[in-house]
Amino acid sequence: MFNTTSVRRMDKYQILVKKGRLGMIVEDWLQHSECDLRIRNAKTDGCRVVELTDPLYAARIIKWLQAAEKVNIVKQ
């Protein structure tokens, strides 16, 4: 029997990035990551929101690629 109490939902990372840096993130994601990536328009002009659930790749975008303008973590 599958124990549903041990399953933890993944937190969603919403990373605000400038439109010009989006290509770098997508190219890096294609080469290095196996997580799902969602890109949507942001309310801030000239920016997009990258949504993902992988904390390691979120850290890569924030620290190594230095593309984040703002980060929001949604607990699920």
Image (tube, rainbow, N blue to C red):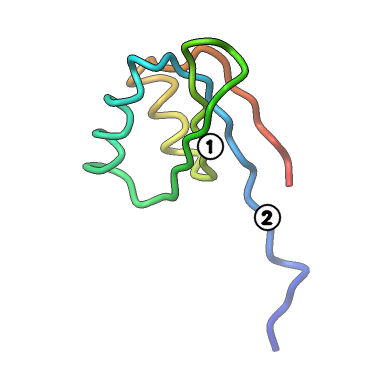
Q: Amino acid at mark 1?
A: Glu
User: Could you tell me residue 24's position as x and y percent?
Assistant: 27, 24
Residue shown at 21%/42% (left/top)?
31
Foreground mark, 2 or 1, reads: 1
Q: Identify the element where label 1 is drawn.
A: strand
User: Could you tell me residue 47's position as x and y percent?
Assistant: 49, 16
Q: Nearer the viewer, residue 70 or 47?
A: 47
On the image, which quarter does residue 29 sit in?
top left
Vertical relation: 25 (above or below) 37: above
Which sits earlier in the primary sequence, circle 2 or circle 1? 2
Residue shown at 45%/29% (left/top)?
59
Q: Amino acid at mark 2?
A: Arg
Q: Identify the element where label 2 is drawn.
A: loop
User: Could you tell me residue 73's position as x and y percent?
Assistant: 65, 31
Q: Is residue 76 left or right of residue 34?
A: right
Residue shown at 53%/37% (left/top)?
51
Q: Nearer the viewer, residue 1 or 43?
A: 43
User: Could you tell me residue 40's position as x and y percent?
Assistant: 52, 33
* Residue hosting label 2: 9
On the image, which quarter does residue 70 sit in?
top right
Q: Quadrant of the N terminus?
A: bottom right
State the residue lying farthest toward the right: 5
Judge the density around disc 2: few (<14), some (14-19), many (≥20) Cα neighbours within 10 Å: few
Q: Nearer the viewer, residue 54 or 21?
A: 21
* Residue hosting label 1: 51
Q: Nearer the viewer, residue 56 or 61?
A: 61
Judge the density around disc 1: few (<14), some (14-19), many (≥20) Cα neighbours within 10 Å: many
Kindly report the distance in space between the C-alpha atoms of the residues bearing marks 2 and 1. Answer: 15 Å
